[in-house]
Amino acid sequence: MLEAGTVRKLKIIKIVEFGVYLAEEEKEKEKVLLPKKQVPEEAKVGDFLEVFLYKDSEDRLIATTARPKLLLH
């Protein structure tokens, strides 16, 4: 289960115009968007990225490659 406030190593399952979708497994229903500006140039489907998960202003789960200064737990 993907949860806001955690750092996860996720797999790129789909590349779209505005970023990439990440999930734990390719056939996973639960996926999260990593915006295009944060996607490494050489990224391709099947690659793993370490990301921090958070909720945006519309309460959607989003990934970022930026690391928080503090993690709880």
Image (tube, helix red, strand yellow):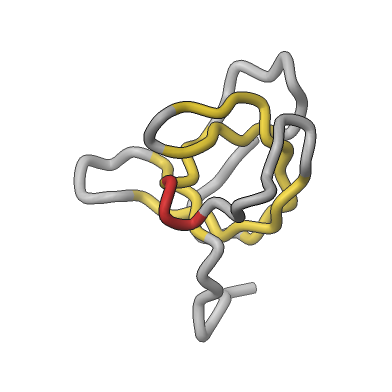
Rendered image quadrant of residue 24: top right
72 on left or right of 50: left
Q: Is residue 65 above or below residue 44?
A: below
Image location (x, y in percent) of residue 50: 69, 58
Please tell me which residue is depicted at 53% across the width and 36% down the height of the picture: 20
Outermost residue, left direction? 57
Q: How many marks?
A: 0
Instruction: Give the camera-side residue of 33 and 30.
Output: 33
Rendered image quadrant of residue 13: top right
Image location (x, y in percent) of residue 61: 42, 42
Outermost residue, bottom direction? 69
Image location (x, y in percent) of residue 18: 38, 36
Image location (x, y in percent) of residue 6: 59, 59
Instruction: Give the camera-side residue of 5 and 44.
Output: 44
Q: Check the picture and name the quadrant holding the C terminus.
A: bottom right
Outermost residue, front direction? 41
Please tell me which residue is depicted at 47% across the width and 27% down the height of the picture: 16
29 on left or right of 37: right
Please tell me which residue is depicted at 55% across the width and 63% down the height of the picture: 65
Please tell me which residue is depicted at 42% across the width and 46% down the height of the picture: 35
11 on left or right of 31: right
Q: Is residue 15 above or below residue 70?
A: above
Q: Check the picture and name the quadrant holding the N terminus.
A: top right
